[in-house]
Amino acid sequence: MTFLRHTCRLRAERGQVLALGLFFLFACAAVMYLMFNSGRAVDEKIRLTNAADAVAYSVALMETRALNYDAWTNRAIVANQVAIAQAVGLAAWLRYFERGVANAPLLASLSTSWIYEPSDYPDLLRLVAAFGGTAYANALGGQPIARALPALERSLATIVAAHDGAAHALAGSQTLLHASLATGAAQQALASELVRRIDPAMSAELIPSSHGFASFTRRYGRNEAGGDLRGRLAELTTRSLDEFSRDRRWSIGGPDIFPLQRNVELKRRGGTELIGFDQWRALDTLEHEGQRLRKGRWRWQRQSLAWSAAETGSSEGGRGDHGGSYRDNPKTSKGYAEPSMRELDRVGASFTGLPATRGLADLAAGSETSTGLSLRVSKPRRALRLSGGSSRVEPSGRLHQFDATVPGDEFAALARAEAFFDRSNARTDGRTELPSLYAPYWQVRLASPSAADRAWAAARQEGAVLP
């Protein structure tokens, strides 16, 4: 009897442990299920956020490279204009030298009939030797200079046409590039391609209101809303000219000696200039002047020794300074150089004017100096690696109460990236370089999405707050 009572007590105790074990088993299963879902959700959110950042950065990098391309091509356009100026200046200088060789005897006569500063005699002797020696060799060789000049002019004209064509081709490439990026279609296509490579189930959307690339830059050309806007390109080109092109100037002076002479000067003036926006012109003169005392009065004596002028393109009028030729050598400039103007377009040159270039739309100090875009990257619930999604772990029975639902039936993340101007290396002159499309120092960075971006994305997510 005692044995039977003990056996019954053991059986009762076993029944109580089984119930408690089932409760703990269910609790552990629920906790494990929640841990699985939470871990997977965190992993999916991290993957989605990283993908959004990577795609936004890559798309903004494409726009940054477009801005740097603008800067490099703008510089190349300036370089082509400088090359045109050099070719026109060299064409004028060759004819100037030819005329100086022809007048070498007159120069030699003037150098001996006037007295000059002792310190200037070495320069004077070199000039006389250059013209005189070339004249002697030219006479012995059967006038090779006259035979060679036409061929040289045609070569220089070809150089002008080639550089003009290159400059306008670069300007055209800028127009095509910005036309392809203005609407955001190329950026959207790139973003979609990148997220598919990261995860085929992901999709990316460019937030339209966040994209300001089209309005960040503008075209500075001939017939724009504000008129002819090529002034900045003309200024930068003029400032970029080499010393020979900009100002070919020197003087050899003589002392005032009563009653022999006064105001004696041998003046070399010349330079190549952009006339308006559609013509390059070069002019060179060499003139001697001085005063002699005649019948009690000082009288001017001026001799034109060398001159030349060349141009390409067309202009509505006006003239340049050309190293002070019109001011200091008016007789030679107006009486000899202008009438001898060589029109290089007649021998093959073609200058169609300064091309249009891209520049920042707002050049005012303190204006916005960055442009960017915001992206929304999403992944549908059915593709998430959660229970009930693409995972093979499915809730059933009472565990279904712990199944999480994704707001809007998808996970989504926002990201923003910007192109901004940043010169990493400081200028040697200590100055701060302002943002422009003539300096290829545009960088890319991640930025915080704006409130408008979040509002737009929340509306797509049924009002849910996004990471």
Image: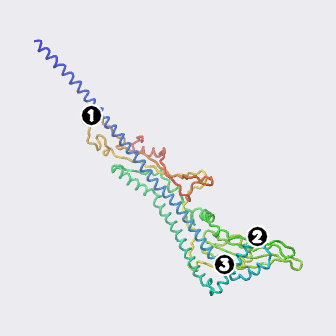
Q: Residue at left 18%, top 21%?
A: 14
**Disc 1 secondary structure class:** helix
Q: In the figure, residue 121 lies in which quadrant?
A: bottom right
**Disc 2 secondary structure class:** helix
| CA distance separating discs 2 and 1 | 106 Å
Query: Which numbered disc flags the more N-terminal residue, 2 or 1?
Result: 2
**Residue 393 at x, y percent in the picture:** 26, 40
- Mark 2: amino acid: Ser
Pointer 1 residue = 399
Numbered circle sitting on residue 97: 3
**From this viewpoint, which residue is outermost toward the right?**
296
Query: Is label 2 in contact with label 1 (beta carbons under 8 Å)?
Result: no
**Residue 199 at x, y percent in the picture:** 34, 49
Which quadrant is home to the N terminus? top left
**Residue 9 at x, y percent in the picture:** 16, 16
Query: Is label 3 in contact with label 2 (beta carbons under 8 Å)?
Result: no
The one of 98 and 213 positioned closer to us in this rendering:
98
Label 1 packing within 10 angstroms: few (<14), some (14-19), many (20+): some
**Residue 133 at x, y percent in the picture:** 68, 81
